[in-house]
Image (cartoon, helix red, strand yellow):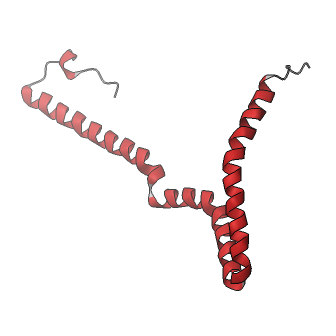
Amino acid sequence: MNHAPLSSAKVKLSARQRRDALLAECALQRTALGVQTHQLFEPLSAGNLRQAILARLTVPLMVTGSVLGLMLLRPRRSLPWLLRASALLRHAKVALPVIRSVLQRMNRHQPPVEK
């Protein structure tokens, strides 16, 4: 708060008045702190957190549901398919960083585009 300290006030106050003014100022500070704390934790509230997580998990949940559906409908055909998919993921974990570094190098060496 941008208040001048009470001790620098030009008006002479009694000890009781100073005490009451300080108590009122402390109450205002506690209220302001409570509001600011609530604002800080608002993004972590149950509704907002649930929406943020579900927005990021929509596609993985759809893929997981599809895989589980395939496994239930065609169990003999799904195992080889899952083995191929896991092998592809292992290769992708190795290949993606290499591809990213090559693309970054290519972007650095491009001359600036003139307008």
Image location of residue 79, percent across then percent down: 68, 75
Task: Kindly identify the residue that appears in the image at 76 percent across and 33 percent down.
Answer: 102
Asked where in the image residue 27 lies, by quadrant, the reply is top left
Q: Is residue 34 left or right of residue 66?
A: left
**Residue that lies at the very extreme toward the left in this rendered image:** 15
Image location of residue 78, percent across then percent down: 71, 76
The front one of 102 and 33 is 102
Relative to 109, say whether 81 is above or below.
Answer: below
The front one of 90 and 69 is 90
Q: Is residue 69 left or right of residue 111?
A: left
Relative to 70, say whether 97 is above or below.
Answer: above
Task: Kindly identify the residue that appears in the image at 32 percent across and 45 percent down.
Answer: 34
Relative to 5, say whether 96 is above or below.
Answer: below
Image location of residue 35, percent across then percent down: 37, 44
**Residue that lies at the very extreme toward the bottom in this rendered image:** 73
Task: Kindly identify the residue that appears in the image at 61 percent across and 61 percent down.
Answer: 57
Image location of residue 39, percent across then percent down: 43, 45
Task: Kindly identify the residue that appears in the image at 21 percent across and 15 percent down.
Answer: 8
The front one of 7 and 73 is 73
Q: Quadrant of the C terminus?
A: top right
Relative to 103, say whether 8 is above or below.
Answer: above
